[in-house]
Each structure stands twice: as C-alpha cells, then as structure tokens.
C-alpha cells in the first residue's frame, strides 16, 4: 500500500541494528558500572544529553516548521514527528540518572559541601534533588503534551486536508515554541550547568537550543539521504530539499560558532574569577586540543564545505557533512560536560584530559535504544511527505 | 469523490496563502504606479507639511550641535558615575532601528520570502538614515569631531595605533562597515529601477540625473547574469554582518565588568532587540506612506501581518533575555549581580524598568490576536509603543547599571539636560527629513522585484 | 544613399516566454554576438543564450580571504610588535579580541569587491550605448522584451538577419544605429 509498507524490511533492518548496538552498549556499560561507578554516571549523562537534544530538538524544529512553513520542513516532517514521539523514552531514561546517579554527578547534592559554601546555600532553594525531579516532570509534561497535540493534528491533516488543519497546528506551535524554549533552558541549567554549581552564563540555554537545532538537522539529513535511496521514496530525492536543508544546517553551524565565540570573548575579556574557571578547565591539560579540534572541525571545515553551492546540491555530500556534524556534536557536548569532572581539588583547578572508554559506550548504548525506538515510531505512520495542496 | 475534491479546493482558496501583490497587475501597471510617486505626484500638501516640520526639527539639531561645539560636551548630562548617557542610548537605539532594513532585504532574500520585495527598498533606506543618525552621537561625543579620523588605524606622527583589545575600536569598524555595505547594497538594488526612472522621466534634467545614477543599465541578459549573483552575495554578506554589528555594540557593554552589562546573553539579545525595534519603525513609516500614496496594492495586509508576527517573535526573544538576566542575577549568588537587579527594579530608576516591561513585553502580547494584527491604527500605535520600549531598554541597561556600581561612595544620579533632549528629537528630525526626500525623489518600492511577483504564463520556458 | 553604420538589428517581444524562445532560436541559428534585454531577470535566458557562469564569486572569495588574513596580521603587528602595550594584563597577542575587527574587514573587502566586480563585468558606468537609439527601447525597463543581434556577428547579413528576426514573430524589428 504505502511507502512504509514497501520499506518495512529496510526499516526493520536498521531497527534491529539499533537494538543490537543498544544491547552491546548496555553490556559494556554494565561492566563499566562495576569498574567505576562515578565514571559510569558521567558518561551516562553525556550520552543522555546527546540523544535528548535530538528527541526534543525534533519538537523544536517541527514547531518552527509549522510557524514559518517551507519545503524543507515538508521533506523531513515525518522524521521530526517520529522524533517527537521518542520524548517519553527520554523521560524514562532520565529517571535512573536523577534517582541513582545524582550523587556521582552533582556537587550540590553533597550536604557537607553545601554546609560549607554560602553560595551553594543560597542556591539550594533551586538546586535540590526534589526540586530538580519535580521540574523535570514539568518539562517533560510540556514537551509530551506538545508532541501529542502536534502528532494528533498531523494525523487529522492526512484526511481533512492541509490548509484545513494548518491553523490548529500553528495555534499549538506558536505558544508551544515559547514553552519549549523555556523548558529546555531550565532543563540544561538543572542537568548540565549545575555540574559546576558556582558558574553561570545567561546565554547557556540559547547555546543548547542552537545545538539541538543543529544536531536535529544533521540527523534528519542523514535519515533523508538514506531513505530517499530506497525505492518508493526515490522520487522524493529532490535537489532543492537537500540544498535548503544544507543551508539551514550551515546557518545553525554559524549560529553555534557565533554564540560559543561571543560567550568565550565576553568571559575571556572580563577574566572574572567566578567565570573564567569554566574556560580554564576546558582550555588546559589536553582539553585545549579538543577546543581547537572543535574550532576546526565543528566550524571551519563544515563552513567551507557548506559555503559551496555544489556541495549543498549533492545529496551524498550534504549527507556526509551531516554525518560528520553528528559526530562533532558529541565532541562538543563532551567538551562542555566532561571537564567539569576532571580537575583535582585545590586553589587553582588543574584539569586533565581523561577520555574513558565509557564516554563512547554510554552514548552508543542510549543511541542504540533510541534508534530502535525511533524506527518503531517512524514505521507507525506514512513516510510519504504530506503534500501542500 | 468529486464532492470531496471540491471542498478541498474551496478551503484552499479560503485559507490558502494571501497574496503579496494585489491581483490584476501587469509589468506596465507596476512600473507606472511606483515610478509615478517621484515623477508625477510631485509636491502633495502632506509631503510639504511633513517635510517642513521635519526640516524644522532638523534645524533644531543643527543649532544644538553648534551650541555643543561652542560650549563642549559639558552641556550634556553625563557625569561621573554615568559617563554614558543619552548619546549612547540614542546611538544604540538608532543602530538597532537600522537592522530591520538589512534583515528584510538580506535574510528574507536568502530565505526566499517573497513578501519582502515590496518593503525592502524602503527598509534599506531607513537603515541608511538610521545609521546616519547613529553616527551623530559617538562623533560628537568625541568632543572634537574634526579629529574623528584618529579612531582609524593609520601611520601617524604620534607613533601610536588604536587599541584592538577595546570593543570601542571594534565598534568603529563594525559601524563603518555596516554603513558602507548598506549603502552599496541599497544602491546596487536601485540600479535597475533608476534605469526605469531614466526611461520614464519627462524633463531633460531628471533624465540626465537618473541616467547618470543608472550607470547605463540596459537590462541585458549579461547584466542580469552578474547582477543576480552579486545581489545574492551581498545578501549573504549582509546577513552575518547585521548580526555582527549589534553583537559588537553589545560587546561595548558585555566585555566590561559592570554588573548589568557583563552578561553573555547580550549578543543574541541585542540582535533580537534591534530587529524588534527595526520592524516597529518600518511599520511606523510604512503605514502612513501606504495610505498617503495609495500603495495598498504593494504593501498588503499580508505584509503588515507578517511584520507583526516578526515583532511578536523577536519581542519574545527579548523577553527571554530579560527573564534570563533576572534569573541568573539571582542564581549567580553574586552580591553585585543581585544588588544590580534589585536596584534596577526597586531603585530610583525602578520606574524605567517597569515601564520597559509594560511597553516591550506586556502590551505587544496583543499581537497574538489576528484581529489586532489586522487593525491598522492599533498596529501603528503598537509600533510606536515598541519604539519607546526599546529606547527604554537602552536607558535601563545604561543608566541603572552605571549609576550604582561597586562602591557606594561613587553612586550618583543622571539627569538628561535640554540639550540631550534636543539632540535626540533633532536626530528624529534628520531621519524624517531624509525619509521625505527619499520618498520624493526615488522609487520607494523596488519596481523590478515587484515585477517578478507577477505570475508568468509558463515557468518552464524553452529548454 | 550612404547609410549610417549599423550596430545591429533589434526585435521587440511582449512576453518573457517569446524572448526566451527567440534567444534559443537565435543561438541555434548560429548567431553568437547577440543580447537579450528584459525588465525582469529571466533565469531561462542563461540556458537559452549559453551564458557563462559569472566569475564574480571567485573575485569575492579571494578578496574575502585576503582581507581576513591581512587584517588579522595587521592587528597582530600593531599590538604585539609595533606598539606593544599592556592592557589590563591581557597578552600582547590577544587573538580573541582581534576576531571582531578581522571579521568586519573580511566582510567589507568581500562586499566592496562584489560591487566593483559587478561594475567592471557590466562595463559600468556606460552612459551611452547604441541600443538606446531605438525609441521603443525605453520600454525595456517597463514591460517589453528585446533581442539585438550585433552587426559584428560573422553570420550577420542585414537582409537575411532581418528575415530571420521577422520569422520569430516579434512586435517589430528595428535597425540600431551607432
């Protein structure tokens, strides 16, 4: 009947591979958990945040598409919608981390540290475990509610016609994107920024929002690139779609560089003790090489490639750059998250680069499960894009 | 089945996209109607009255500047804790207003948004004039504007170079680049239309002037070939440029240490604020203009609606910025950050913070309603409210952060003098004077771009 | 009767489609020195006339790279070598502070090169051109479409070219005087 039916074997294959990678990763993580309890949770956080950005980023881009329209969104909408339906899975995966892992991750859960630190006492109204858990429930309630409504109306759109349902989708998306942005901001403050509880940056939430958009565009391009190689969707293999998606990925790459650099320049120039430590940890003791790698491979190389029209107009090339960006997003998150743990105590933080193998195993484990669940969701609906008619 | 198809079609016409050009136009009518404003409409009464008033206000600016040059910048209000007063507030306000022009013509061109075509010319002119007004303030704040060239790096007898670690030098480069690129972008966009004006002008004098300005444009396929790619590149360059300019303006504050200035969110939040105020100014100007010159066919309700939505969106980003500032001031646990925020909201300038929230955040939420976006007088009033709100934002950032910093012994108050006010109002006079001249002598809507909105018989052509 | 030298022959059309068709036929017929004039950019003409891609982007990218490297090097030179000054304990080679100005100059040099190349490639300013001698050519900037075959084209023959242009069903064919 539909493209979904015809492609079922192909999608099943990817789904099985995802599950397999997930199981292998989980076994590795289990071993890791036995060996190094703290390291396990730190790597888990990295993997979790990466795939969380992809799931919730799908919601953000979907709402953006409903508001501004554009052929790019029509092309990747099925993928985005499947992505939004994986948000409940991300909620389930968050719970063990908050309930079991928080002591390994967050300094502010250590009562004896807080007792000695007036700043942490001041923050304890906000940074306390019941509060973080309660807020997580609120964030996920918002995202899941939005995802459910958008998926429901999208289903209606199949039968009732594009223009008839569009106003409904817009009415959800416009306030939805505001709620989504606020929820993501506070979520990353709770889960990631509070790893270094003295440090703060007002642009932090925006940096994650842009990163989410970027990783989601990259993933959807890779997905489209492979799906349009398969028979029934071959006619969807439109050069313009890839060109537009490539341009958007390019724009988000630039936005990422813009926000990252301006935050760095502001903090570097002011050189205030409570702020600059964040960069001291991330630019010394080996982490500096990672920062340089980010500058070159997360910005300069994709910038120069995507600047060229002919790269954006070739599916295989855009797909390759996108796959590359998927890797670089993980490197960027690793650079943002991991140095928080890798410094010795003392007056001046002495960072040292420690790249534990679990930092790879945990993202693979969570990613495998996520891909498996994502493919399950993708198969549930039609794969042919809903035409604007 | 047929029944089903029919309902589908009717919904399409009912709820489908509204036109960005009123139906029934041809290449000829578009050209004639837009070119008629400078060529045939001449000197209508509303133009003469409006121009005279603007020119008088501009005269007040010139007198203020004369007084300022004679007496020195002590006639302004800035004092020791508040070393930057109205001059930087107005500078940032004007630069911000300019941003919508570049945004409309560049970013929307890249995003293939057709509705931009009929407002881009006008908005770009607004950019130029706003940047000209902005230039006034730092130039005269130097005290000796005839030595303003000292800001540029050139080999000199003092054997000194400007300081590239200072954001003020970044500002010199950012604003001059912005002014230059906006000017050439605007002029390049005008060339095909200047040719239309040359070919349609009746008087020899007008023919010669427009002819010189059109540079010999013939609309040849070779010309278009280079022209299209040049426009695209200029748009591609202007888009990151416009972001960088307000970013650099925000660095003027954020790179420093003063609580209330030193915030990492400043760059994106300044850019969003700039676009917010810029779109408000486009509406403030476009609404009367389309009514006076009968341009409703080109600047349709669709345009007004879209601009309102952009304002709503950017306004929400700005509100997000305020929220982050407030939250992080508390979350930081930093004594000075917390005091800054407390002083900002409940100190002697608390009124300015709360009016800012009312003007910039609360009132514009009316734009969620479609009815409000379709109500032209209301949109006009809202655009003025947002302009005032964005001015207040700069006032709050600059005055409330400076007047009470780390040392209570150096606290003080800032009171603008009458020269501050006359310089501010006078710059509005300069801006409006230039706008009136622009509308009178140049096509204020891009003729050739609006021509491309006319549907063609077959897009495929002969391949 | 001695005739003024001719620049070429010009045919007038009323729709872009006719112009594209005509340009296509003219190229097929073997003419190479001809040009089409229109009040709007017509993408299909690029194909029909076998125009080369504009070299403009190459100039722009070169200028941008030169501006970028040049300005960064200059800032390094003035702050670390020629005029070393300690500002708030920042290093002399404060590369993060050099980025904004370098960026602006990159955009400025690329932008000015775009405009300069546009003028150069189009041969502007060019206040006089023979095609302006055709009275109805004024409409090329309003709503009419023109095609001009130059007399310099080796295939050009007044009589035969005129007949060929007439076969394209134009509104009118006129001689373009120099």
Image (cartoon, coloured by chain):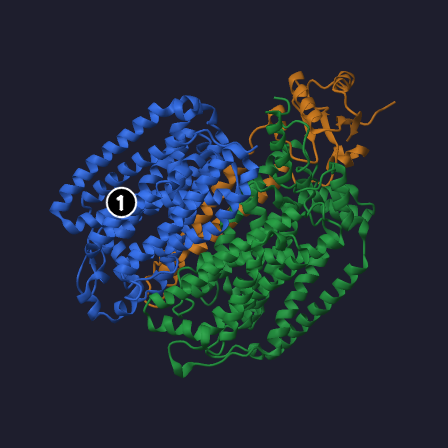
Chain colours: A blue, B green, C orange
For this rendering, which residue is in front, B129 or A33?
A33
Left or right position of B99 against A278: right
Identify whether B92 is placed above or below C152: below
- The residue to which callout 1 is attached is A47
Q: Position of residue B43 (x, y in %)?
A: 81, 56
Left or right position of A32 against B243: left
Q: For the C terminus of chain B, give its image quadrant.
A: top right
Identify whether B272 is placed above or below B30: below
Residue B234 picture quarter: top right
For this rendering, which residue is in front, A43 or C51?
A43
For this rendering, which residue is in front, A286 or B280?
B280
For this rendering, which residue is in front, A61 or A221?
A61
Identify whether A350 is placed above or below B444: below
Q: Position of residue C109 (x, y in %)?
A: 51, 48
Q: Position of residue B322 (x, y in %)?
A: 45, 63
Q: Is any atom of residue A140 visible in this view? A: yes
- Number of marks in picture: 1
Identify the secondary structure beneath mark 1: helix
For the view shown, which residue lies furthest in the right direction? Answer: C1
Q: What residue sits 66% from the left and 62% below the top? A: B431
Left or right position of A65 against A370: right
Q: Is any atom of residue B176 visible in this view? A: no
Q: What residue sits 28% from the left and 59% below the top? A: A194
Q: For the N terminus of chain B, give its image quadrant.
A: top right
Check the residue under mark 1 and report the chain it is in.
Answer: A
**Label 1: few (<14), some (14–19) or many (≥20) C-alpha neighbours in 10 Å:** many
Q: What residue sits 22% from the left and 53% below the top? A: A99
Left or right position of A43 against A235: left
Q: Position of residue A8 (x, y in %)?
A: 36, 25
Identify whether A86 is placed above or below B277: above
């Amino acid at each position: 009947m539909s493209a979904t039916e015809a492609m079922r074997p192909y999608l099943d294959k990817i789904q099985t591979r995802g599950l397999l990678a997930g199981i292998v990763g989980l076994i590795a993580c289990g071993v890791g958990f036995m060996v190094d309890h703290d390291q396990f949770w730190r790597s888990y956080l990295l993997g979790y945040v990466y795939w969380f950005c992809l799931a919730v980023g799908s919601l953000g881009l979907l709402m953006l598409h409903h508001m501004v329209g554009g052929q790019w969104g029509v092309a990747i909408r099925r993928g985005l919608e499947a992505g939004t339906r994986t948000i409940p899975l991300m909620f389930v995966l968050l719970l063990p981390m908050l309930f079991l892992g928080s002591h390994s991750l967050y300094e502010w859960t250590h009562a004896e540290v807080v007792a000695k630190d007036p700043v942490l006492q001041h923050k304890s109204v906000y940074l306390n475990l019941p509060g973080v858990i309660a807020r997580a429930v609120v964030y996920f309630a918002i995202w899941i509610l939005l995802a459910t409504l958008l998926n429901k109306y999208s289903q209606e759109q199949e039968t009732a016609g594009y223009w008839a349902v569009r106003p409904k989708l817009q009415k959800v998306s416009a306030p939805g994107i505001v709620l989504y942005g606020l929820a993501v901001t506070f979520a990353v403050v709770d889960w990631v920024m509070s790893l270094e509880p003295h440090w703060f940056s007002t642009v932090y939430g925006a940096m994650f929002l842009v990163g989410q958009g970027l990783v989601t565009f990259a993933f959807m391009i890779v997905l489209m690139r492979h799906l349009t190689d398969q028979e029934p969707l071959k006619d969807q293999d439109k050069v313009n779609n890839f060109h537009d998606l490539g341009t958007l990925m390019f724009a988000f790459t630039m936005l990422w560089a813009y926000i990252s650099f301006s935050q760095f320049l502001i903090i570097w120039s002011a050189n205030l003790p409570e702020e600059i430590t964040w960069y001291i940890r991330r630019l010394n003791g080996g982490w500096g090489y990672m920062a340089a790698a980010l500058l070159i491979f997360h910005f300069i190389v994709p910038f120069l490639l995507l600047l060229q029209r002919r790269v954006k107009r070739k599916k295989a090339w855009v797909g390759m750059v996108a796959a590359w960006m998927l890797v670089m997003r993980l490197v960027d998150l690793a650079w943002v998250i991991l140095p928080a743990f890798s410094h010795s105590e003392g007056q001046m933080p002495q960072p040292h680069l420690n790249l534990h193998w679990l930092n790879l195993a945990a993202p693979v484990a969570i990613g495998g499960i996520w891909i498996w669940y994502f493919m399950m969701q993708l198969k549930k609906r039609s794969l042919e894009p809903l035409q604007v008619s | 089945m047929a029944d089903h198809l029919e309902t589908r079609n009717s919904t399409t016409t009912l709820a489908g996209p509204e036109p960005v050009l009123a139906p029934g136009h041809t290449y000829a009518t578009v050209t004639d109607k837009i070119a008629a404003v400078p060529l045939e409409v001449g000197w209508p009464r509303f133009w003469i009255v409006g121009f005279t008033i603007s020119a008088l206000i501009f005269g007040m600016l010139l007198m203020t500047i004369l007084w300022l040059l004679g007496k020195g910048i002590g006639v302004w209000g800035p004092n020791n804790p508040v070393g930057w007063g109205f001059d930087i507030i107005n500078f940032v306000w004007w630069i911000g207003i300019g941003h919508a022009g570049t945004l409309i013509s560049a970013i929307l061109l890249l995003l293939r948004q057709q509705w931009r075509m009929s407002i881009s010319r006008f908005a770009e002119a607004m950019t130029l004039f706003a940047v000209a007004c902005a230039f006034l303030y730092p130039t005269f704040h130097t005290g000796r504007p005839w030595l303003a060239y000292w800001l540029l790096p050139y080999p000199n007898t003092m054997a000194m170079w400007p300081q590239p670690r200072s954001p003020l030098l970044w500002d010199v480069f950012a604003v001059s680049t912005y002014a230059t690129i906006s000017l050439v972008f605007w002029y390049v966009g005008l060339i095909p239309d200047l040719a239309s004006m040359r070919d349609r002008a009746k008087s020899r004098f007008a023919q010669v002037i427009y002819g010189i300005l059109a540079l010999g444009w013939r609309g040849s396929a070779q010309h278009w070939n280079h022209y299209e790619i040049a426009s695209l590149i200029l748009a591609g360059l202007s888009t990151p440029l416009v972001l960088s300019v307000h970013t650099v303006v925000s660095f003027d504050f954020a790179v420093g240490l003063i609580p209330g200035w030193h915030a990492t969110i400043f760059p994106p939040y300044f850019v969003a604020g700039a676009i917010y105020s810029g779109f408000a100014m486009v509406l403030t100007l476009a609404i009367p203009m389309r009514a006076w010159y009968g341009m409703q066919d080109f600047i349709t309700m669709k345009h007004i609606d879209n601009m309102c939505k952009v304002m709503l969106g950017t306004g929400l980003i700005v509100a997000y910025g305020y929220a982050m500032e407030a939250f992080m001031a508390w979350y930081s646990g930093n004594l000075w950050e917390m005091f800054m925020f407390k002083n900002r909201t409940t100190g002697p300038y608390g009124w300015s913070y709360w009016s800012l929230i009312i003007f910039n955040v609360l009132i514009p939420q009316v734009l969620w309603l479609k009815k409000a976006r379709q109500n032209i007088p209301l949109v006009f009033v809202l655009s003025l409210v947002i302009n005032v709100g964005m001015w207040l934002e700069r006032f709050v950032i600059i005055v409330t952060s400076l007047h009470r910093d780390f040392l209570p012994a150096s606290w003080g108050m800032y009171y603008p003098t009458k020269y501050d006010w006359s310089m501010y109002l006078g710059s509005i006079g300069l801006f409006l004077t230039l706008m009136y001249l622009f509308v009178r002598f140049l096509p204020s809507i891009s003729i050739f771009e609006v021509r491309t909105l006319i549907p063609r018989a077959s897009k495929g052509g002969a391949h | 009767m001695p005739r003024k030298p001719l620049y070429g022959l010009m045919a007038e059309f009323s729709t872009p489609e006719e112009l594209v068709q005509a340009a296509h036929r003219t190229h097929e017929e073997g003419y190479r020195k001809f040009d089409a004039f229109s009040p709007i950019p017509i993408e299909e003409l690029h194909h029909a006339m076998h125009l080369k891609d504009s070299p403009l982007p190459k100039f722009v990218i070169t200028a941008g790279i030169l501006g970028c490297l040049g300005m960064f090097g200059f800032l390094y030179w003035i702050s670390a070598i020629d005029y070393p000054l300690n500002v708030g304990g920042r290093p002399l080679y404060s590369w993060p502070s050099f980025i904004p100005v370098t960026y602006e100059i990159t955009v400025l040099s690329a932008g000015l090169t775009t405009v300069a190349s546009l003028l150069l490639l189009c041969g502007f300013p060019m206040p006089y051109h023979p095609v302006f001698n055709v009275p109805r050519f004024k409409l090329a900037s309003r709503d009419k479409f023109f095609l001009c075959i130059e007399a310099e084209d080796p295939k050009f023959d007044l009589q035969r070219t005129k007949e060929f242009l007439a076969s394209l069903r134009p509104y009118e064919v006129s001689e373009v005087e120099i």
